[in-house]
Image: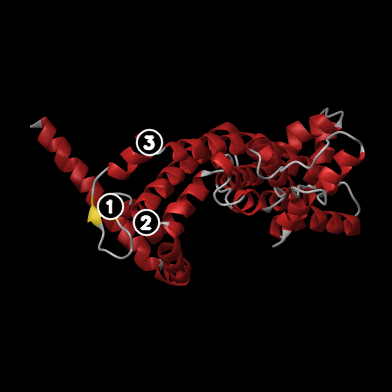
């Protein structure tokens, strides 16, 4: 009897909450109308593709034939039979673990140093640091530097000083591929997160620093720890998410510099593996399974980052 009474009270409370929510929606219908264009676009280009990809990950789908449901077979093949995928996972995590945190720290430090420059010089420095992340032919510079003949700049310098006797195939030798890729990715890591840090520094109220020095802040490191970092928590979280996302999404750099496929799959990444099955072999079901695993890993990493940085704004 008590259980039944509790259940009925719970249902009554739920109905009241739903009715209250509907009344609030009616009162704010104009606001929802303004939000509708963004909501429709967000659902169409973000939510719907994610849901479709998850659905197709449980099917055999090659574009030419109707999708055929096969359950978890794609995931079983990925984890237990696809050795190239395991190599791609290892390479991706090496790149993410190194370039993610290092690129994040470098972006923050450069933004901190640039913030101290005069206004006109700061604008020039931001453009210089941000340009490599948006340049369409940024890889061309490194393809020339590490060209595998005597005309490559790096080979030419080493041969001139007698450090090597013959040109090395830097971008084709598995021994050097990952090192070069990490250097290139770090060089291109001053992207959206870097801009958010620059904007964050500009948005801090200068009176907070004056109050800090009155309260006992004595040097720039104490100022950074007690005032700057707490004031930039939203930018720090955004920059961290963008950094880890770009680190896991590495694909263009290894494909353009090291070839597709790379020697012994030494530069294979998860996104490159997805590109191979999705756009070269047209095995969309298998590619969707790869995309779903990558999506889940990135969600977990985002949760971990949010936990490390604490709740935004608190």
Whether residue 176 is visible, yes or no, is: yes
Residue placed at 58% from the left, 39% from the top?
266
- Residue 271 lies, in percent from the top left, at 51, 49
Residue beneath disc 2: 284
Q: Earlier in the sequence, mark 2 or mark 1?
A: 1
Front residue of 174 and 74: 174
The picture quadrant where one finds residue 124 is: bottom right
- Position of residue 133 relative to residue 308, above or below, is below
- How many numbered discs sit on the rendered protein? 3
- Residue 12 lies, in percent from the top left, at 20, 47
> In which quadrant of the rendered image does the C terminus lie?
top right
> In which quadrant of the rendered image does the N terminus lie?
top left
Q: CB under 8 Å between callouts 3 and 2?
A: no
Residue placed at 36% from the left, 50% from the top?
286
Q: Secondary structure at mark 2?
A: helix
Q: Which color scheme does this rendered protein use?
A: secondary structure
Direction from residue 11 to residue 166 in the image, left or right: right
Disc 2 packing (10 Å; few <14; some 14–19; many ≥20)? many
Q: CB under 8 Å between callouts 3 and 1?
A: no
Direction from residue 299 to residue 154 in the image, left or right: right
Whether residue 311 is visible, yes or no, is: no
Which residue is at the far front?
165
- Position of residue 59 relative to residue 269, above or below, is below
Alpha-carbon distance for marks 3 and 2? 17 Å
Alpha-carbon distance for marks 2 and 1? 9 Å
Front residue of 299 and 36: 299
Residue beneath disc 1: 59
Q: Secondary structure at mark 3?
A: helix
Residue beneath disc 3: 79
């Amino acid at each position: 009897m008590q259980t039944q009474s509790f259940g009925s009270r719970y249902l009554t409370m739920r109905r009241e909450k739903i009715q209250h929510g509907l009344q609030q929606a009616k009162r704010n219908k104009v606001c929802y109308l303004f939000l509708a264009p963004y909501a429709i676009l967000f659902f169409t280009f973000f939510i719907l593709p994610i849901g479709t990809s998850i659905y197709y990950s449980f099917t055999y789908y090659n574009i030419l034939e109707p999708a055929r449901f096969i359950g978890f077979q794609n995931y079983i093949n990925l984890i237990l039979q696809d050795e190239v995928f395991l190599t791609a996972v290892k390479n991706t995590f090496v790149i993410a673990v190194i370039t993610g945190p290092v690129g994040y720290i470098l972006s923050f430090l450069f933004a901190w140093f640039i913030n101290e420059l005069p206004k006109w010089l700061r604008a020039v420095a931001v453009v210089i640091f941000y340009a490599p992340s948006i340049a369409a032919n940024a890889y061309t510079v490194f393809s020339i530097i590490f060209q595998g003949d005597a005309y490559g700049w790096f080979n030419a310098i080493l041969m001139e000083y007698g450090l090597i006797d013959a040109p090395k195939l830097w971008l084709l030798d598995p021994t050097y591929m990952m090192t070069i890729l990490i250097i290139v990715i770090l060089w291109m890591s001053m992207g959206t997160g870097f801009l958010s840090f620059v904007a964050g520094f500009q948005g801090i109220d200068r009176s907070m620093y004056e109050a800090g020095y009155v309260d006992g802040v004595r040097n720039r490191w104490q100022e950074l720890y007690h005032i700057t970092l707490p004031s930039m928590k939203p930018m720090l979280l955004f920059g961290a998410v963008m950094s880890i996302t770009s680190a896991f999404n590495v694909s263009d750099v290894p494909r353009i510099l090291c070839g597709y496929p790379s020697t012994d799959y030494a530069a294979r990444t998860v996104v490159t593996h997805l590109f191979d099955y999705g756009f070269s072999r047209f095995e969309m079901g298998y590619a969707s399974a790869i995309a779903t695993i990558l999506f889940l890993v990135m969600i977990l990493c985002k949760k971990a980052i949010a936990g490390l940085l604490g709740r935004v704004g608190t």
